[in-house]
Image (cartoon, rainbow, N blue to C red):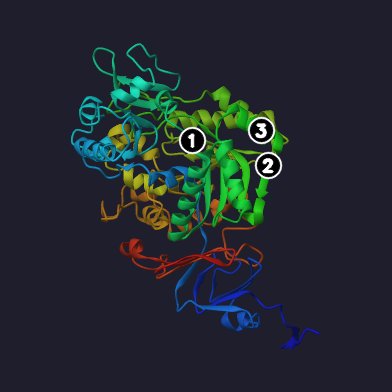
Amino acid sequence: MIPLVGGLSAPESADTIVTNANVRTVDTKQERAQAFAVRDGRFVYVGDAAGSARYRGERTQTIDAHGATVLPGLIDAHGHLLDLGLGSRFVDLVDVGSYDQVIARTAKRAHETAPGAWVIGRGWDQNRWTGQAFPTHEALDAAVPDHPVLLTRIDGHALLANAAAMRAAHVTAATADPVGGRLLRDATGAPTGVFLDNAKSLIESVVPQATHDEIARALQDAVTLCNRYGLTTVHDPGESRRVIEIDEELAREKKLTIRTYVMISDDDADIAYYLARGPKSGLYDGHLWIRSIKLYADGALGSRGAALLAPYTDDPANSGLLLSTQSHIEGIAERALRAGFQVGTHAIGDRANRIVLDAYAQAFHAVPEARDPRFRIEHAQILSVTDLPRFAQLGVIPSMQSSHQTSDMPWAEARLGPQRITGAYAWHSLLATGVSIANGTDFPVERVDPLITYHSAVTRENGAGAPPGGWYPRERMTRDEALRSMTIWAAQAGFQENDLGSISVGKYADFVLLDRDIVRIPAEQILAARVIGTYVGGKSVYQAP
């Protein structure tokens, strides 16, 4: 017989109780709490300490938070797990201040690498260098003549190859630019070594592929790093069937300490396979979702591949690159709607965003029976003011990355000019139309740390507090909006809001403890906050030393 407590049946004991906490639930029905209880990986009680005590049994673990702030497990709505995990194996070129430094780091790795083997690096950004000019291969050839070298730009939309790499790929002056790509060339027409967008595949196609075990280790390494920063869910856009099957393998073997919403890459065979298989949600105890397709409309602003309605202000002969046609996006979108899949399309420039919105509108018209498709535009970075209301009108979710703004602000206005910049990184303007924003980092383009995401969203300042008051501050998010963009709104963008995104009874017990309350502390202290612990399904996946 179940004993009575206060005239009511005593609840079944919990596995874990967290008490003495400043709990920000992100649940509008109960926004604050002091304690909660977890059983079988889900929240069974959220409230005060007295209420949680009713769930204490002989085997219940009690965690005294000592006043720490507890948030729902943080969600990165756009992060590339495999690229993040493989990054530790590459030459790290992030924050390198000159091409000479790029060459020095690459030459050092080449010296440590077997003769003739590829040297791979990532992270260079010519916008950080004096003059901001794209590099050319000659100086790299002189330093690394005997290894093929592939160095990917920070945004992933351009790469630099040395002469040995171009020889391996049989690239010459006669090589034509592919559709949606461009080889930068010198005055004679010879390739300079920089390959933009779809042209990258000319070099990438001859690089030895990672093995199954290398991919598995990289994914696990990435997940471990995400957990360290308080992430419990990642939306991973644009993975191949091969990688997704390794995701499944790891999830099945309980080796993924994160929930992954994986988006299928734009590959005909992969898309056909998964559409035939049908949408899958919450596989392996809620660790894997496979119900979305990732497309590409254009390139990136930093490499001037973003497709603009008018030429670049700082490159008047160039309006960017379209990587896909509107008809291609529309066709995939219609197939996805009929199969119950979501589509998320990369679009940076105003022309690309308009094309995607037009394609989605046509697809919705062609498949009117589709219900709640929640199509997304990944980045939605530069918008014509006339297109801002269309997201809400069409029910399209802007999946944006607030730290892109603080990284891009030193040079973005030079690219766009004073008029177009008003529609760039326009978070407040979009929210005012009634949409929600799914926030993320686009790691490894930006750092994994979601506190940078939060700080950028609420201040529009970099880590040094510049510019004071924020860059175009009218587009800041409120603190509540920023938190929602990293929790419940991100969950909604992945059809996960019934299971994730808030500390609510019945949802998975994913939560993170912080050493201070980022919603209340002065903005200049946000980046000093630290993750004390991260929990997925009520189980610890990270504890601060």
Which quadrant does the N terminus fall into?
bottom right
Residue picked out by circle 2: 279
Question: Measuring 72% from the left and 82% from the top, which residue is drawn there?
Answer: 10
* Front in this rendered view, residue 344 or 508: 508
Q: Position of 538 compared to 439: left or right?
A: right
Q: Amino acid at mark 1?
A: His
Please tell me how crowded label 3 is: few (under 14), some (14-19), or many (20+) other residues with Cα within 10 Å.
few
On the question of residue 450 being in view, the answer is yes
Q: CA distance from mark 2 to mark 1?
A: 21 Å
Q: Amino acid at mark 2?
A: Pro
- The quadrant in which residue 18 appears is bottom right
Q: Position of 342 compared to 225: left or right?
A: right
* Residues tagged 1 and 3 counted as in contact (Cβ below 8 A): no
* Residues tagged 2 and 3 counted as in contact (Cβ below 8 A): no
Q: Earlier in the sequence, mark 1 or mark 3?
A: 3
Residue picked out by circle 3: 273
Q: Which mark is residue 346?
A: 1
Which quadrant does the C terminus fall into?
bottom left
* Residue 374 point in image, percent of width and height: 61, 42
| Secondary structure beneath label 3 | helix
On the question of residue 432 being in view, the answer is no
